[in-house]
Image (cartoon, rainbow, N blue to C red):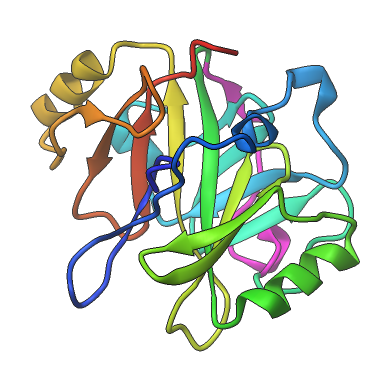
Amino acid sequence: MQHQGILVRGSAGPLVAVCRVSPLYTSLLPPKADLIPAPHLTTLQLPLPWETFGFPSQWLGRSVHLVTGDPAWDWSDVAPAFGIPATEDTDTTLEEPTHVQGWAVDHIVLLVPALDEAVAVFAEIGLDPRLRMQVRDRPAAFFRAGPLVEVVESPVRNPAIYGVTLVCDEPLEGVALRWRSMGLNISTVHSAIQPGRRIFTVHDTEAGLAVLSPDRAL
């Protein structure tokens, strides 16, 4: 998502969401920690082995509790009705997360069969899209729910969390080198669409994962 972020795989190769810088870009910027909107995402569970990447098994990235397990999420209030389970409906036991300085969730990717229906679902909990656009000829919308939620219309039967893009304060080249030394399959670090930002993608994972440099304009 080169607004930037996570790769959405397809039979024709990876689909990269493209959100070019526009006058609406400022509406997509992450909120200050004390201005997190309600309702907002509080917990994100994905089949990503966080300890493999050097994180605690359960950790806090700014305002989101990250957990390993089958895809699930928790919200501060009522969750949008996409049929995605809450963490309490899975086998995971939530523990007090370890706060990891310098790392946060930039955005998550939600795949849906019909974008207009997804927009209506978010409207039911009081969230309106900050931006609507085409992502590789697929309709997409962006919602601010603490981190950004990128919603992409895709050939899926049911809504599904595809993956997450993290943002970190460390130089990305150093992170990529460290993770490669741990045996992880990492792409090259390359420029993001946003001026001054860089990104890399982690391959061979059960959920999409990318890491983005911070927006120094914030």
Instruction: Please check the rendered image and state whether residue 88 is part of the magenta-colored stretch, yes or no.
Output: yes
Q: Which segment is the magenta one?
A: 85-100
> At 56% across and 40% down in the image, what residue appears?
66
Identify which residue is drawn at 85% across, 64% down: 123
**As rendered, which of 89 and 154 lies closer to the eye?**
154
Up-down relation of residue 120 to residue 125 (above or below): below
Q: Can you give x and y, in whole percent of width and height, for residue 37 in the image?
A: 84, 36
Above or below residue 96? Residue 101 is: above
* Residue at image location 80% in from the left, 30% down from the top: 36
How many numbered circles does the render carry? 0
Q: Does the magenta stretch include residue 175?
A: no
User: Which quadrant does the C terminus fall into?
Assistant: top right
Q: Residue at x 55, y 52 (%)?
A: 45
Q: In the picture provided, is 112 more to the left or to the right than 87?
A: left
- Visible residue check, residue 83: no
Q: State the image quarter where residue 12 is shown.
A: bottom left
